[in-house]
Image (cartoon, rainbow, N blue to C red):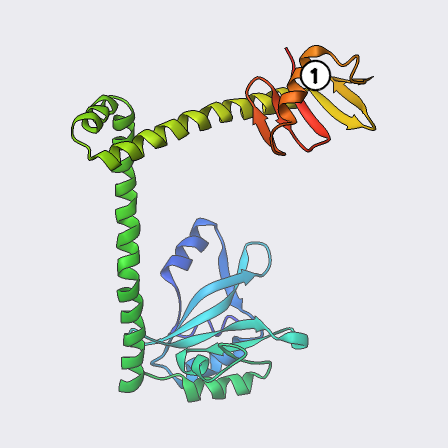
Amino acid sequence: MSLNTLNLSNVVIDERLQRELTKENLALNGVMTLIDPVVSRLATLNPLWNFVVTSTTYNNGNGRLAADFKVMLDSEELGHIGTSYMGNKGRVISITNDRISKNRERSSSYRTSDAEKAVLMAKKMFGKMNPSERISKAWDEAERVVTRASWNKERERSNYQGIVKSELIQWAEGKGFALFMEYLQKEAVPHIKQKIDNAREKLEVLNTEMKTIERVQNDFGARNTALVVKDAGKYLVKIKDNVDMYDDNNLPLDMRMKLGMLKLVEDEQYLTDVGCKVTSEIFVLLVD
C-alpha cells in the first residue's frame, strides 16, 4: 500500500465519492495492495488516461483504501480496474470493459492474481472504441431507450387512469348510482339491462353468503360456535372448552335442526344463521 499512486496527476477521486468521504470525515490514504501496482503501472505508462476512484474499502479507523478505478480518456470510459472473488483463489484483480465482457463466458471480467498479466490485459483491451464498437454500443443504448419508452409511459398512464377510475367509481357508487339506474330503465338495450339485473341479484346472494361466512369465522375464532363431530352414531359437541356427547334422542333441538339443514348441502358450504358443513362428519354450528 502506498500513497504514491494517489499522488499521480492522472489519479483522481470521483466527486460524488469525495463528498461522501468528506461528509463522513473519512480519509483516502492508499490503494488496495492487490491493485496498487496495476493502477500505478498503467497510470505511469498512460499519462493521458485518467484513473477515477469510484469506491473504497475499510482500512484503519477513519481511513479508506481505493478499491475500484474507472479509467477515462477524453470523457470516454475505457474500462474498470477492481477486485472480485475467484473460486479457491479468493480475491483477485478484475479488469473489465465491453470488449472483455463480449469475449468471456463465465465472467464479464478478466480475473487474475498476477499484476503483470492484469497490466498486459488492460494495455491490450483498453482504448477508444472503433467505429464498429461505437455503433454497436449506440445501438444497445438506443434499443434500451426505445423499447422501454412505451413501458414507462404505460406505467405513468396507468397511474393517472387509476386516479380517474377511483374517483369515478366513488362518484358512481354514490350520487351517480341513481342516474345509472335511470339509464338502465329508460335507455339501456334489453340484454344490457338483463345482464345488470342478473349481476345485482348475484351480488345480493354473494353479499349474504359473505356475511354468513364472516359471522362463522368470527364466532369460530372467538370459540363461540359449536363444533359437532359424528362418531359411531354419537355426536361429540365442543363449545368453548366443554365437550359433551349426545345421540339422536338427547341432541338439543336447535342443534338437530341445524345439522339436518347442513346435511343437505355440499362440504364446505355455509347456511345463513346455521353454520358450516366442513365434511359429512364435521359441522360448525352458530349458537345463540
Locate the N terminus and report the quarter of the image it occupies.
Answer: bottom right
Q: How many labels does the image show?
A: 1
- Seen at 55% across and 20% down, the residue is 272
Q: What secondary structure is found at the residue carrying circle 1?
A: helix
- Seen at 56% across and 21% down, the residue is 215
Q: Judge whether 80 appears above or below 202 on screen.
A: below
Q: Is residue 130 visible?
A: no
Q: Which residue does the numbered mark 1 point to in the structure image?
A: 256
Q: Is 245 or 104 nearer to us in this picture?
A: 245
Q: Is 195 or 6 nearer to us in this picture?
A: 195
Left or right, 10 with respect to 1, comes to left
Where does the image place residue 131, in percent across and percent down from the top left? Answer: 26, 86
- Seen at 29% across and 70% down, the residue is 143
Q: Judge whether 94 appears above or below 267 on screen.
A: below
Residue 91's image quarter? Answer: bottom right
Where does the image place residue 53, in percent across and percent down from the top left? Answer: 43, 67
Left or right, 9 with respect to 87, comes to left
Locate the C terminus and report the quarter of the image it occupies.
Answer: top right
